[in-house]
Image (tube, coloured by chain):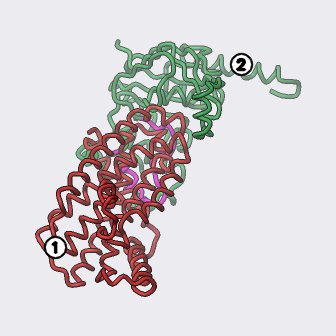
Amino acid sequence: MRVFRYGFLLRNLVVRDFKIRYRNMSLGVFWSLLNPLVMMGVLTFIFTKIFPNPSIKNFGVFVLCGLVPFNFFSLAWVSGTTSLLNNAALVKRVRLPREAVPVSVVLANGIHFLIQIGLLLAFVLGAGYGVNPHWLWLPLIFGLEVVFVCGLSLASSAMDVFFRDVRYIVESTNTVLFWLVPIFYSFAIIPEQYKTVYQFNPVAAVVMACRLILLENRQPPFSILWKLTLVSTVALLIGLAVFRRSKRRFADYL
Amino acid sequence: MASAIEFRHVSKIYYRHHTRRFFHRYLMERMRRVPREPFYALRDVSFELEEGGSLAVIGPNGAGKSTLLSLIAGLSFPDEGQVEVRGRVAGLLELGSGFHPDLTGRENLVVYASLLGLSRKELRDRFDEIVEFSGIGDFLDEPLRTYSAGMILRLAFSVAIHVDADIMLFDEILAVGDQAFQAACLDKIRELRRKGCTFVCVSHSSELLKRLCTRGIWLEGGQVVRDGPVAEVIEAYQLSLVAHAHSAGPGRG
C-alpha cells in the first residue's frame, strides 16, 4: 500500500485540513460536538414525545450510538469525494502521491470522529452504563469504518474528477442511508429476511456493534465482524484500483 | 554525458469539452463513437537535455510551455511518444499551489516541504536554512494572507531549492520577486547548477532567461520552432514578434 509510505506527508495534510477548518472560528472544535448534540435532541424529542417508543430506554444515548458513526461516514465521504476538485491546484501543479489527497481528508474527518466518540462515551457513562471489556473491540470497529470510507472516497473522488455529478450522487446516497441505517430504530425490529443484508452495510454493522458493546454489555457477534472486515477491505482494494487506473489523467481534467 | 530529460516525438492531445464532459456525453461517445475534435497542446516534440543543462522555454501564450513542464514533472502523461526523466524533480509550476491563506508561513512551509517530498528528518535539518534564505523573518508566524506575492514566492522558492532535486522546473514565477531576491535566486541557481542540477525555466522575461539558461527552445502552436543557444533563440523569437507586429497593419509595432 503506497499510501502508508508517506506518513509525514499524510500527517501534515491531515493537520492542515483540520486547522483550515477551524481557524478563524470562535467556537472551533465545539462545532464538532454541536451537530450530533442537536440531532440527538431533535430525534429524542420526536421519538419520546411524538412517536414514543417505550421499548428503547435511554433513547438519547441509543440514538447517539447511531449518529456518531453515521455522521463520520456521511461527512467524510462527501468531503473525500470532492477532495481532488477542492485541491485541484495541488493535484495539477505539485507532484505528490495523489492517493494522499482523499485519504488525508477522510483522516482529518477521523479527528472529529474521535472527538465525537469521546462525547458518546461520556454520555454512555453518564447514563449509568459501565465500562466493560468489550470496549476493546471499539477501536477495531471504528477503524474498519475509517478504512471503508477511505476506500469509497478513493473511488468516488477519482470519478468526481471526470463526472462532477458524483458529488450529488454521494449526497443523495447519504440521505437515503440516514433511514436505512438503524439510527433511530433498533436492529431487533428489522424483519428477519432483511437482517443479513443490513449487516453487509458497514455503517449499519458499526452502529449495531457499537450498541451491543456500549449499551448491552455484549460482544459483537462474529457474523457482524467478518462482514465488516470483508466489506471494508474489499472497498479499500477497489478504491485503490479505481484510483490508480485513473490518476494519470487527473491533471488533464482538473 | 547522460541526458536528464528526453522527449521522443511527444504529443499531448486535449479534446474539446474536456471540462464539461458529463456522464451522458461520455455514454453517447462510447456508444456512437462520436468523433472528438483533437487539439494538440504539443505536437511531435523531440529534444534531449543533458544532466546539468539549463533550458529556457519561450513562446507566446498557449504555445504549450506549461504542458511541456507538467510532462517533465510527471503530472500529466503524453498521448504519443515517450518522455524520459531521470532523477528527482521539483519545481514551482504555479505560485502558491499547496499554500493556504489561513495558515501561517511556518505551517505552509512544513506542508509544502512534505508535498515536495522532504522527509521529517530532512526538513528538520534544513528548516533554518529555508527560513533564512526566504528572508521572511518575523512574518513566519503570520497567516499567509498577510503576505505579498513576492513574499509567497520567496517562501515557495526557498523550499523548492532545498529539496535537493536533480531537475528543477520554474514556470513564470521568478519575475514576482524584487531585484535583490532575484539576484539571490540567480546566485543560488548557479550554485545548484555547479552541483549538477538541471534547470528548465519558462518565462517572458528574456533578460532573466539569458542569465539563467544556456539553451533555448521556442515553442509555438505546440511545435518546436527553434532549438539552440538561448541568446539566438530569444533573438529569433523577438524578431518574429516585431515582424508579426509590422505585418499586422500600419500604425502598430
Q: In this rendering, do the residues under marks 1 and 2 share a single chain? A: no
Number of numbered discs visible in the structure rendering: 2
Does residue A190 appear in the picture of this structure? Answer: yes
Find out whether the residues at labels 1 and 2 contact each other: C-beta distance under 8 Å.
no
Query: Is B97 a magenta residue?
Result: yes
Chain in green? B
Name the residue tied to disc 1.
A217
Instruction: Name the spot of residue A73 as percent of width and height, x first.
Output: 37, 59
Magenta-drawn segment: B91-114
Residue in the image at 15% along x and 65% along y: A219
Chain coloured red in this rendering: A
- For the point 52% across and 26% down, the residue is B68
Q: Position of residue A108 (x, y in %)?
A: 35, 58
The percent position of residue A8, horizontal first and vertical second, equals: 28, 48
Label 2 secondary element: helix
Residue drawn at (28%, 38%) of the image:
A2
Label 2 neighbour load within 10 Å: few <14, some 14-19, many 20+: few
Q: Is residue B219 above or below residue B130?
A: above
B26 in relation to A39, above or below: above
**Is residue A7 a member of the stretch shown in magenta?**
no
Crowd rating for badge 1 (residues with CA inside 10 Å; few <14, some 14–19, many 20+): some
Cα separation between marks 1 and 2: 82 Å
**Side (left or right) of B37 relative to A144:** right
Q: Chain of mark 2?
A: B
Identify the residue at horizontal 51%, vertical 60% (top origin): B146
